Amino acid sequence: MNRVPSVLPVVDENICTGCGECVERCPSHAVSIVEGRVHFSAGEQCTYCGVCEDVCPEGAVSLYFEVVIAPAARGQESMQTITEEP
């Protein structure tokens, strides 16, 4: 099952050159070029795989990530979620 992220990758428009490398390599076809800049025009298709971040030659794409700390096997009731932003 593909997990649809609640937060899409972030593109720093100040350093994105619009080269299209992320568009060409996105396996879910969630990225496009709009007015010379990267846009997640089909964000619902984004699987948060990280390819766009990995292939960007300028480092303009960043993925927020979520760390989930699951309850220990001792039967703890709660789950703690930590979200870190770049």
Image (spheres, helix red, strand yellow):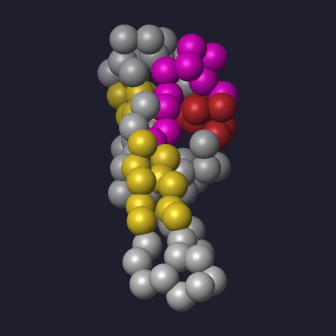
Nearer to the camera, 59 or 34: 59
Q: Quadrant of residue 80?
A: bottom left
Image x and y of residue 58, in percent: 57, 14
Image x and y of residue 38, in percent: 43, 28
Residue appearing at x 63%, y 17% in the figure? 57
Considering every residue shown, the one lying at the far left of the view is 35
Residue 43 visible in image: no
Give the answer, above or below, for where 56 lies relative to 82.
above
Residue appearing at x 60%, y 43% in the figure? 50
In what quadrant of the picture does the C terminus appear?
top left
Residue appearing at x 33%, y 21% in the figure? 35
Q: Main secondary structure of the magenta part?
A: loop
| Residue 59 within the segment the image draws in magenta | yes
Residue appearing at x 40%, y 78% in the figure? 78
Residue 49 visible in image: yes
Nearer to the camera, 72 or 67: 72
Q: How many marks?
A: 0
Give the answer, above or below, for where 45 lies relative to 23.
below
Q: Which residues are magenta?
A: 55-64
Apparent side of residue 61 relative to residue 43 in the rendered image (left or right): right
